[in-house]
Image (cartoon, coloured by chain):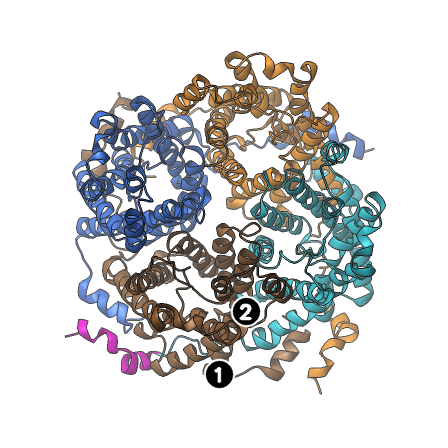
Chain colours: A blue, B orange, C brown, D cyan
Amino acid sequence: MTKTEPMEVLRRKIQIKNVLLRNLLAEFLGTLMLLFFGTSIVAQFILSKETLNTWIQINVGWGFAIAFCVYATAKTSGGHLNPAISLVMVTFGRLKLVHFFLYTIVQTFGALLGSGLMVYYDAIQHAIAHENISTKHLIQLFCSYPGDYLTWRGAFVDQAVGTGFLAFFVCVVIDKRNKIPDAVHPLFFGFILMTIGMAFGFNLGYPINPARDFGPRILAAIIVGKEAFTLMNGMYWIAPVVAPCLGSVVAAWFYHVGFGAHLPEPEEEHYELPMKLVTEESALPLKQFEQ
Amino acid sequence: MTKTEPMEVLRRKIQIKNVLLRNLLAEFLGTLMLLFFGTSIVAQFILSKETLNTWIQINVGWGFAIAFCVYATAKTSGGHLNPAISLVMVTFGRLKLVHFFLYTIVQTFGALLGSGLMVYYDAIQHAIAHENISTKHLIQLFCSYPGDYLTWRGAFVDQAVGTGFLAFFVCVVIDKRNKIPDAVHPLFFGFILMTIGMAFGFNLGYPINPARDFGPRILAAIIVGKEAFTLMNGMYWIAPVVAPCLGSVVAAWFYHVGFGAHLPEPEEEHYELPMKLVTEESALPLKQFEQ
Amino acid sequence: MTKTEPMEVLRRKIQIKNVLLRNLLAEFLGTLMLLFFGTSIVAQFILSKETLNTWIQINVGWGFAIAFCVYATAKTSGGHLNPAISLVMVTFGRLKLVHFFLYTIVQTFGALLGSGLMVYYDAIQHAIAHENISTKHLIQLFCSYPGDYLTWRGAFVDQAVGTGFLAFFVCVVIDKRNKIPDAVHPLFFGFILMTIGMAFGFNLGYPINPARDFGPRILAAIIVGKEAFTLMNGMYWIAPVVAPCLGSVVAAWFYHVGFGAHLPEPEEEHYELPMKLVTEESALPLKQFEQ
Amino acid sequence: MTKTEPMEVLRRKIQIKNVLLRNLLAEFLGTLMLLFFGTSIVAQFILSKETLNTWIQINVGWGFAIAFCVYATAKTSGGHLNPAISLVMVTFGRLKLVHFFLYTIVQTFGALLGSGLMVYYDAIQHAIAHENISTKHLIQLFCSYPGDYLTWRGAFVDQAVGTGFLAFFVCVVIDKRNKIPDAVHPLFFGFILMTIGMAFGFNLGYPINPARDFGPRILAAIIVGKEAFTLMNGMYWIAPVVAPCLGSVVAAWFYHVGFGAHLPEPEEEHYELPMKLVTEESALPLKQFEQ
């Protein structure tokens, strides 16, 4: 990182000094890269008919994709890449409401563009030409699709809960009193995403991110057809847009009310008993060694 | 974490100062979140008929679920979330016996509530309506169920051993002389859980946690029917409640008797030979280079 | 690491003082070890007919193989093991162009030799004798093979994009402003490789490394037959050689133009709002606690 | 770790002061725990007919089992748990030859005992009673069994190479010049083991540890029958005993000759070019930004 390195020279020439602008750029490009990566993982799952990728690759792949896209943007915009997380930051006083709307727009637009840059053009053309892929699967290449049995209420609860778990554990990780080193935060977010995909993927596929679901859904409507928006009498698409925002805020504050607020300060009394208690009451089990 | 942040304001208003009370709250909510997360993982495995989740997701998912629920509670109550681990802490003089009983009650109650907050209501209703799920599988959504071949003694040994491995490796990780940084302890507990699920899951499904098995079993009895408690002439449910407590304490002290007690202090003689031995006896193999 | 240890004695005798020479040795042997390890992973996948290894082992196995081969060489040559990454370093001013050509030669030669040191000689002989393996699979033991549906353009885009993601995230990881500790860089490269294999493996198998594909392809042509080079009218093999170099350089500079150049310095204004904004505008959500 | 804690009191009473004795105890109990854990993983794979555990659990499970058993013993005996690694340490001048023989004996005896403590007694009895398990599979519960096609030479090469990769990467990890923090060494050994199982498991199942294979083979001969030792005209069992010792020593010194000896000291010239080179020759690619 010496001054003569080409990237440093570039930096001096083009660095965006406006904080909001560069944050929006980071959220836009970060979400674009995330969807570019992520929809390729889903495409490999669907196009190989679940023989190459199985569900574990969806979980682990999306987890790492998020982890490293957050690493790319964390020091600039905070690396939300998800309006539901940005909204949590609004309630934490770390993001202005008006900025939240701007974040949401660029995240959604980034997601839309990212999901369109497919390396699987040949494979999809081939599958369509051989009538080897259903409209459902074509839509799933871009965005979520509910299980046959699922009600709208079920979809809403699913997305509120799934995103809630994300927000809850994001709060666990970033709460400085839990003493998790900054450098592993994005990796841990990835692990959390993996686990959410193992727990809340069955109903509709855990988008848990309004931008990630809505942006690509527009593209699906353009490319595949209006079915992307007509599911459940045209109501389905609302669930993965609205529910994550509600669920994430509730869960984030549930963390602070139920856990974070009660974390002892380093100097406070610890869960380990003070030593006099040890020597008196609890020392019993080791009597056998003390004869 | 400046004083004007909303969470810090909240903290000053609602923080529970009583150590026992806030520890009980942490154990209660932590076990609730763990079961909420964990039973969803199991449900995705069972309801998809092992096509979406396979056994690897049960292992990895539960591992990370435990890791992050422990991160959420470690700095408050120690993050036991398991009466068998709490009992080990009693024998270590780090928890009063009376507190152990309180811990156990809130852990069990948290587990019961957590396993009831299902996002898979629609899917379960659908499976029941189409007679597409057995009573055995319905019970397994909540708690353990023994293999056909399994004797009660086999179940007891299984749970004692499985929880024993958990307690043994927890002791390895938290023993300060092994120099494993605090910040990775919960993650490592998660890795240990993953491995236990790969080794001791075949007989009955590695609950290795009395609260995790007994709490949800009550709910299973209410929702599914009394079969949850009548297995093996009504004796089965006792094994995953009693055996973990026995196994964990024995294994924890086995660690200290067999390993921990003999760990050298940093200043003690090391397993690497003193240098004179190197130059004299063991320097042989490099003679060829010294000509 | 005392002076009398045999490895230290050896070191004093044989250490190569010439920086270029020892870097070339590291790249040569590192790529050799990588291919020795990696082709064994592929062979286990193909020879077991995807029953022992499934695609997840290809992903995780190659990821860790790369991680640890980079650990072995990072402190010497930088641990590129891939001409596409070396070329990125040329554009970063960290490698001379003439050295890049030398790196490429030894990487390719190392890859060729590494892929020939098969422990699966018996198994391959057995499969051939029983006509139990196709020419396609025999070639895949060494190098990439395109899907039936794939066009040359599709193969080129695939390799440019796949290697682009590698180079992009390598830049994320090594950018000091992202504050990812040096000691985990190779591990993170491994995680990135895993994810690329979950996203960009369906078309032709993610070589994303000209040396890794071209070196073993020569061996495949010698052992299996000229089909290794005659695919797509003799044009196929060019795609995984040329596209990675293009994709990686574009992606690396895309990182610096879109992300790296705008990273705030530690002392610059942070994405977290200055506190007066918090107390004024954004403090709203916590009003309920402040009564 | 205050003096009044029960484990500390125990420690003062029973700590073994003799370095050799406590190292032997650590190697004995560590290998016992490793085989107890590991054979349960294999048993879950075999007894569930590869439906519960698949090969990925064998890889990940054994990897973590080794990682945490090494954490338990690393600070005492160095955590070899494998005669092939102990032999490498002899050639490094870190273990006396006579101690190596003692290590080997206790490792083998620990492995034998560990593999006998089965929690799958009921399941095995049930499988035998229903003629649902072959002699081959019964032997595989304890130790390695060669593929039909495998020659003795092939088995020998397989074990030499597999253990060689283990020893090679152990040397990478523990070489202080590679700057991998001590606290992650055992975890990294686990990752290496995982990868070896993904690359060298097809021929005979990657024991790559004479104690791990020979100890349990004795038990297999007692319980299952002499077939454990009569494979390949009674010659098979020798390969996984002798080859690992040869392969590990060769690979360890291959590391030091090819890699370790040439690692630059921190103060030496680095692979990054000195800055004058950057400004002159390599600065070309950024000319476009400098107009």
Dot 2 amino acid type: Met
Q: Is-magenta flag for residue B211?
A: no
Q: Are marks 2 and 1 on the same chain?
A: yes
Residue at the limit of the structure toward the left, as seen here = D291
Asked whether the viewer can see residue D2, the reply is no
Asked whether the viewer can see residue C290, the reply is yes
> The N terminus of chain B appears in which quarter of the rendering?
top left
N-terminal of the pair, mark 2 or mark 1, is 1
Res. B230 image quadrant:
top right
Q: Is-magenta flag for residue D281?
A: yes
Asked if the residue under mark 1 is in contact with the one under mark 2, i.e. CB atoms within 8 Å, the reply is no
Q: Is C286 rendered above or below residue A113?
A: above
State the residue position of label 2.
C33
Dot 1 amino acid type: Leu
Which stretch is magenta? D275-291
Question: In terms of depth relative to the viewer, which is nearer, B15 or D197?
Answer: D197
Between the C-alphas of marks 2 and 1, the distance is 18 Å
Question: In terms of depth relative to the viewer, which is nearer, B209 or C261?
Answer: B209
Q: Disc 2: which chain? A: C
For label 1, the crowd category at 10 Å Cα-Cα, with few meaning under 14, some 14 to 19 and many 20 or more, is some
Question: At which x and y percent is residue D82?
Answer: 72, 57
Question: At which x and y percent is residue D77?
Answer: 72, 56
> The C terminus of chain B appears in which quarter of the rendering?
bottom right
Q: Disc 1: which chain? A: C
State the residue position of label 1.
C21
